[in-house]
Image (cartoon, helix red, strand yellow):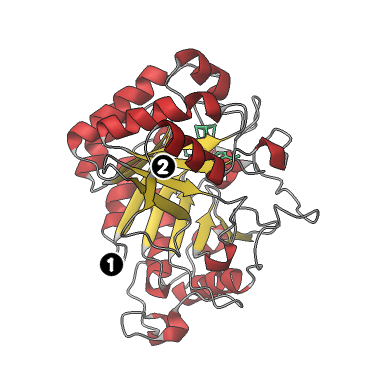
Amino acid sequence: MNASVPLSLPLVNSSLRTDRGDASARLVDTFGRVHNNLRISVTDRCNLRCVYCMPEEVTFIDRRELLTFEEIATFVRVAAPLGINKIRLTGGEPLMRRDLHKLVALLREIPGIHDLGLTTNGLLLAEQASVLYAAGLRRLNISLDTLDPHRFRQITRRDGLQATIDGLFEARRLGFRPIKVNAVAVRGLIEHDLIPLAVFCREYGFEFRLIEYMPIGAEPWERDKVFFAHEIIEKLEREIAPLVPAPDYDPRAPAMEFDYADGRGRVGLIASVSRPFCQRCNRLRLTADGKLRHCLFALEETDLKPLLRPVCEASVLAEAIRRTVWSKWEGHEINTARFVKPSRTMHAIGG
Ligand code: SAM
Ligand code: SF4
């Protein structure tokens, strides 16, 4: 490792350049899947305690172990020439990381990154939306499982519905687009809120996204606890309006997208349990403490912090990224008896 070559220098190794159409530069795994999508967790801390995501009591990562914004940007400067062009910031609650807009501004400047989004619970959004917008962020996913304050407390173990709603409308007022409202489809929870949330999203122009409940939280998970995508479609069609596949729907994307036939809104379904998209998966994840994961459910991770602190030669980091992608398994085995739950829960990996 050569600590004297800063990673922020332009990469000189032509094998790392994708703009020349060099296929060997891409992040391909042994199943031929090409990776362009990176989810970056900026913190494992959260101001909620959603029952499907994390336990009530948690020991958080020591702040000194979190990657700095410059370290994250360094990673992205090396990953972008390998084909990473789409980034989502997440957590924990990403808006709990101080000055997140500064990271947004750093990432926006990196050539090749043309899609940058944020997933947030929205509690701190009203106060941060304008600086995030000024830094260049446009795409937002805001998690909201209910419009009822009592049920909000039941699901998140905290209060905060009004703050989330305020954040949602402030983002809409400022011009963030698209704004998607994410809810987790847990049987016994989502049925009560599905229709009110769907009506709300239609009314105000938010895309409604439902994510099948996955075995990555602290609670014991069973398949029976998932409210499946096909059940959601049936309920929405029965109680609101027929759904038709969205015309610009990309069948390789994780979300199945539908438009209401009356033209008033869009619904996305992430059916990770009933229709796993592993065969088409193009995602990598960087945890807040600098571990690279090839899958949300991966049982192994590559510790990149020693390559970022102190900064190493770009080619060494690029090779570590490539090796992680190459080691990617065929897919999670949620639906089999072989499934093993990762030791970290969702909040500590990055959703
Ligand atoms: N705190 C932010 C938020 O809630 O939007 C970002 C992190 S959160 C872990 C990212 C997404 O993961 C959220 O949309 C959340 O609803 C989803 N999620 C958490 N636990 C889940 C689970 N067990 N199954 C499916 N989705 C889950
Ligand atoms: Fe926090 Fe998001 Fe997990 Fe809820 S889903 S506990 S808001 S990280």
Q: Residues within 10 Å of mark 1 (few under 14, many from 20)?
A: few
Residue 201 is situated, as x and y percent measured from the top left of the image, at 33, 33
x then y, percent, for residue 4 = 44, 71
The residues bearing labels 2 and 1 have C-alpha atoms spaced at a distance of: 22 Å
- In the rendered image, the quadrant that contains the N terminus is bottom right
Horizontal side, residue 150 vs residue 140: left or right: right
Q: Is residue 118 above or below residue 159?
A: below
Residue 182: image location, x then y, percent? 44, 38
Amino acid type of disc 2? Thr
Horizontal side of residue 92 vs 258, given as left or right: right
Dot 1 amino acid type:
Pro
Looking at the image, can residue 43 be seen?
Answer: no
Of residues 108 and 74, the one drawn nearer to the viewer in this rendering: 108
Q: Is mark 2 within 8 Å of ligand 1?
A: yes
Q: Position of residue 301 (x, y in %)?
A: 64, 59
Q: On screen, 348 above or below 10?
A: above
Q: Which mark's residue is nearer the viewer, 2 or 1?
A: 2
Q: Mark on residue 119?
A: 2
Q: Residue at x 62, y 50 (%)?
A: 273
SS type, badge 1: loop
Q: Is residue 10 left or right of residue 305?
A: left
Residue at 26% x, 44% y is 263
